[in-house]
Image (cartoon, rainbow, N blue to C red):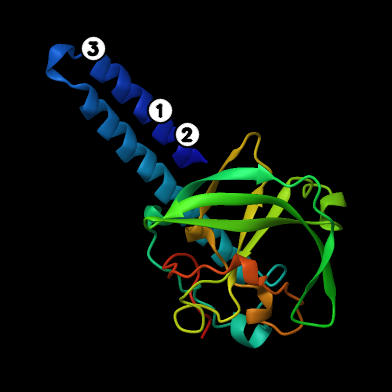
Amino acid sequence: MIHSIRTRRIMLGLILLISGCGDGKKYHDEQQIIAELSSNDDLASIMEFQSDLNKEFSDPETSPLPDRYRKDFNGLDFFKPDTSYRVQALFTRTPDATPFLMPTSTDRMSKEVVFGIVSFQLKGNSYQLEVYQNEDLKEEESYEDYLFLPFTDATNGNETYGGGRYIDLEIPEGDQIIIDFNKAYNPYCTYNKKYSCPIVPSQNALDIEIYAGVKAFK
């Protein structure tokens, strides 16, 4: 957050500076500077996500890792941050969707509803994914706006966990939402079989490689 605020201040200062420089600066130069600063802000957000996740895994109070793994934990293996995997998507609500029971890695079933559909372009192709809201979790304080985006892609079983990965989202105010695959993480059952993890529905399978987010745990 501090970096984000600082970046916005720098951006504002540069825009004001450009505005007062006369005819020597062109409009496209301004747009290039703004784009570069926005990209830096995005990278900072990705790095913050990675740092926070590593802290969570290091803390015995929050880590899914068994003690035998956590004591030697030096950080998760991430793909290099790549903002081309950060996309703006059209968010379409599905208010008439009926709750259903999503299978998990155990006998437990997770009660979910398709809250919306996200439509986006990635690497020149168009995709759609379902976004879910857990019927029980939405009743918990601080989780009223929480949405769940599980997906599989062509890296599963090689560079990434075979069962797919998850992304956390929040209900957007309008019909646009940012999906950052750099913030994709593994289900907790990847690290510890005591956890019950929703299985990614087949309709959320991407036929491309997503070289972003957390890699397979080894």
For the residues labelled 1 and 2, the Cα–Cα distance comes to 6 Å
Cα separation between marks 2 and 3: 23 Å
Q: Earlier in the sequence, mark 2 or mark 3?
A: 2
- Badge 3 amino acid: Gly
Give the foreground label among 1 and 3. 3
Rendered residue at 47%/34% (across/down): 5
Amino acid, disc 1:
Arg
Q: Which mark is residue 20?
A: 3
Q: Amino acid at mark 2?
A: Ile
Disc 2 marks which residue?
Answer: 5
Tell me which corner region of the image, top left, top right, bottom left or bottom right, holds residue 33: top left
Left or right? Give the position of 93 relative to 215.
right
How many other residues sit within 10 Å of disc 3, few (<14), some (14-19) or many (≥20)?
Answer: few
- Reading the image, the residue beneath label 1 is 9
| Image spot of residue 105 (x, y percent) | 74, 81
Q: Are marks 1 and 2 in contact (CB under 8 Å)?
A: yes
